[in-house]
Image (cartoon, helix red, strand yellow):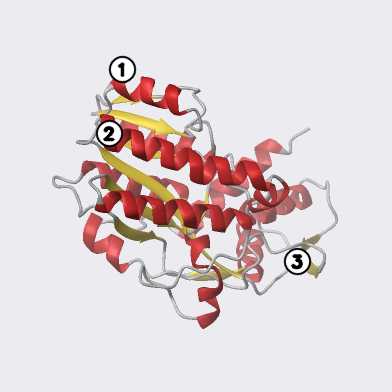
Amino acid sequence: MRILLTGGQGFVGQHLKARLKDRIPGHVLLEDPMDIRDRAAVERFVKDEKPDACLHLAAVSSVARAKAENAEAWTVNLDGTLILAETFETHAPQASFVFVSTAEIYGASFSSGQPLDESAVIAPVNAYASSKAAADLAIGNLSQEGLHGLRLRSFTQAGTAQDEEAILPFLAAQVARIEAGQQAPAITVGHPDAGFDITDVRDACDAYIDALALPQLLPNGTVLNICSGVTRSVRSMARDLLEVAGISASLEVDATIPCPSGLSSMQGNPAAARQALDWAPRIPWHETLVAVLNDWRYRIRP
């Protein structure tokens, strides 16, 4: 299998490449530093390399960066995705096109307080989510016209080599610094009761690979939530990390720290992905905590 991977240098991309080696031995990974907004470059690459599949991760994936660089977020997340998908539809019509979308596109629908399935109303509340929602809908439209598109709406992911903008590394970095005597024994958070549906990035990557490894293609345009179905509060995550570290610390609230997504709680229903992909998160929460904390223990060493 010849797989074009975009965004392979990012947090998820690095984990995905490691999982691909284990899951699809002998695959040919196609990577190119091309700008996906450059239609000529994308068309040339696809025509020359003839991929069997595309895993599309490339995006302006930070809520804060998308707000600060709004125009770039839209041109990368929407225009770049459109160019890539249209190129596959024209020049590699037999190939699978797996678009890694985001649960952020459900936005205001999370206010229901119920676990959301794929039928939930798309109601983004920030620039990142809006640009990804537009791309998600565009893939759905192209899939009606012949693209072998699959949309995987990923909820929060956590793992090693992730920056502090993400919630679990944000907490783990503080616990590691407290443990090392680099910070007073207090974890500062903005919204202790905000809830996140977190999946270990290795499990999420397995779902993406499962989508490629199915013996038969799913119906064009299929949408699947990639999530655990369990919501964890910031307060409980901090407590769990402290327990892993074997130390004590208080929790201090600084209301000026924004909630990463602007949403008070996110929870998904993973039933459709379980049925379609025979996938479920397998890595225990404790193992994820240990991996992320150990990563930050190493990163903060003098």
Q: 37 or 271, which lies in front?
A: 37
Q: Name the amino acid type tagged 2.
A: Thr
Residue 21 got which mark? none
**Residue 90, disc:** 2
216 w.r.t. 9: above or below: below
Q: Label 3, secondary structure: give it.
A: loop
Percent of width and height locating residue 3: 31, 30
Q: Residue furthest left?
A: 215
Badge 3: how crowded within 10 Å, few (<14), some, or many (20+)? some
Disc 3/disc 1 C-alpha distance (Å): 49 Å
**Residue at x 47% of width, y 36% of height:** 13
Q: Which residue is at 22% across, 46% downward?
A: 146
The residue that mark 3 highlights is 190
Q: Earlier in the sequence, mark 3 or mark 2?
A: 2
Of residues 134 and 276, the one nearer the viewer is 134
Q: Nearer the viewer, mark 3 or mark 1?
A: 1
> Marks 2/1: CA distance?
13 Å
111 left or right of 181? left
The residue beneath circle 1 is 48
Mark 1 is surrounded, within 10 Å at the Cα level, by few (under 14), some (14 to 19) or many (20 or more) other residues, namely: few
Q: x%, y% of residue 155?
A: 48, 59
